[in-house]
Image (cartoon, grey):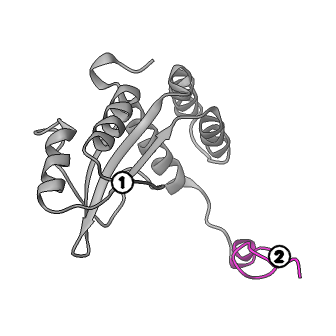
Amino acid sequence: MPTKDFDLDRLRGEILDYVRSVGLPIFHCQGIPGEEGFLYWDAAAYPDFRQFSDVAREAGARMFLFSSLEFSSDEMDGARETLADVEMADNDREDANDFLDSLRPNVGHVAWVRIAWQQDGRRFAYERVAPWYEKLLDLMDEIGDSLPELSDDEDEGPSGRGGFYSLN
């Protein structure tokens, strides 16, 4: 279970309740932590999302963009499958598998949350990522860097269009 001082399950609920209470619409969207194209609020120095929300309203925000992710066993299983495809020392593989096992109590809990708004072509965001999820993302980046690159034939799939094909 997430630590009480960094409980993103609670934070997600508080953010949604607060934004609803100030009367701005919420656009639920998808995303990934640390996504490019956002100016990120300094949540380490100013952790209260209400300050971010107040700045947005004072600047004329008319809608909030909201993204979050509950950690799933499917995501953990996918990480394990990807790990199996990488050549690495046995002790490194064992450490990675132990780390993935340690994540099981987090299944069903919020891994990251972001609230954002857009103005004059810029997107401003308040984002929090669970430390355990940041470690998982770092591990997956390392594993991804170790995966063999696909040849042009493998990359294109059956139709030669990057794995997408028409049934027509």
Question: Along the horizontal axis of the image, is 92 left or right of 66?
Answer: right
Mark 2 sits on what residue?
A: 158
Residue for point 14% across, 47% down: 54
Label disc, if present, on residue 152 of the rendered structure: none
Look at the picture and state if 92 lies above or below 69.
above
N-terminal label among 1 and 2: 1
Counting from the top left corner in percent of width and height, residue 71 is at 53, 35
Rendered view: 168 above or below 32:
below
**Picture coordinates of residue 156, whole percent (x, y):** 72, 77
Does the CB distance between marks 1 and 2 fall below 8 Å? no
User: Image quadrant for the C terminus?
Assistant: bottom right
Looking at the image, which is closer to me, 102 or 49?
49
> Is 11 drawn above or below residue 148 in the view shown?
above
Q: Amino acid at mark 2?
A: Pro
Residue 48 picture location, percent across and down: 17, 35
SS at badge 2: loop
Q: Nearer the viewer, residue 58 or 158?
A: 58
Magenta segment: 152-168
Whether the magenta-drawn stretch holds residue 113 is answered as no
Q: Nearer the viewer, residue 37 or 115?
A: 115
Residue 98, image quadrant: top right
Q: Residues within 10 Å of mark 1 (few under 14, many from 20)?
A: few
Tell me the distance, in whole angstroms, between the alpha carbons under discs 1 and 2: 43 Å
Which residue is labeled 1 in the image?
25
Q: Secondary structure at mark 1?
A: loop
Dominant secondary structure of the magenta stretch? loop
Q: Is residue 161 magenta?
A: yes
Question: As shown in the figure, which amino acid type bears the numbered disc 1?
Answer: Pro
